Amino acid sequence: MNEVVDHTPKGESLLAIMEELAHLLRTARPMPMSASVLVNRAEVLDLLEAARAVVPEQVAEADQIVAGARGVVQRAEEDAAATIAAAEERARGLVEQESLVQAARARAAEIVAAAEEEARALTDNANDYCDRQLAQLEIELGQIGKQVKAGRAVIQARLTPRDET
């Protein structure tokens, strides 16, 4: 006959209870000429009742685990989004800074080129002014030289008649 085994669950998990139920069916006495077996109704009902009692507790635990996992995933996604946003902002700042440096260098090169051009123009103008002034001085000195010669000639002319008297 079928041995009577105490299948009263002891706060086990749903999987353990289902394993006990499967063991009960595997070891049950078969009905001749049939796929049916003889099982103790009370044992099966006890196992089913235990399963019903364990399911809400385990579903609640599973829900808590899933909620915790979702919270972890959400925090990780938020952290990742914040990290990405910070990296993008830093990259934009570096690009802007590099653009500003390049613009400053280009502007500095323009200023230096303009200053050099202005210096060349000023030098050319100064040289031209000096040349004109020297040319004018040369003309004036030429005229003064002629006046000096003429004055000396007058003085010589005055001196020469005295010597004859």
Image: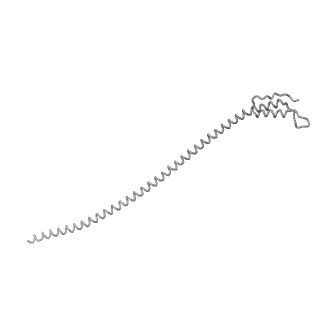
Q: x and y percent of residue 132 in the render? A: 30, 64
Residue 128 lies in quadrant = bottom left
Instruction: Tell me the residue at 63%/40% (across/down).
Output: 74
Foreground residue among 37 and 126: 37
Side of 151 relative to 113 (left or right): left
Instruction: Tell me the residue at 69%/36% (across/down).
Output: 63
Residue 127 lies in quadrant = bottom left
Side of 96 relative to 3 (left or right): left
Q: Residue furthest left?
A: 165
Q: Is residue 113 above or below residue 97?
A: below
Instruction: Tell me the residue at 77%/29% (across/down).
Output: 9
Q: x and y percent of residue 10 in the render? A: 76, 28
Side of 93 relative to 135 (left or right): right
Foreground residue among 23 and 104: 23
Q: Quadrant of the N terminus?
A: top right
Q: x and y percent of residue 62 in the render? A: 70, 36
- Please count the marks in the image: 0
Q: x and y percent of residue 129 in the render? A: 31, 62
Q: Residue furthest right?
A: 33
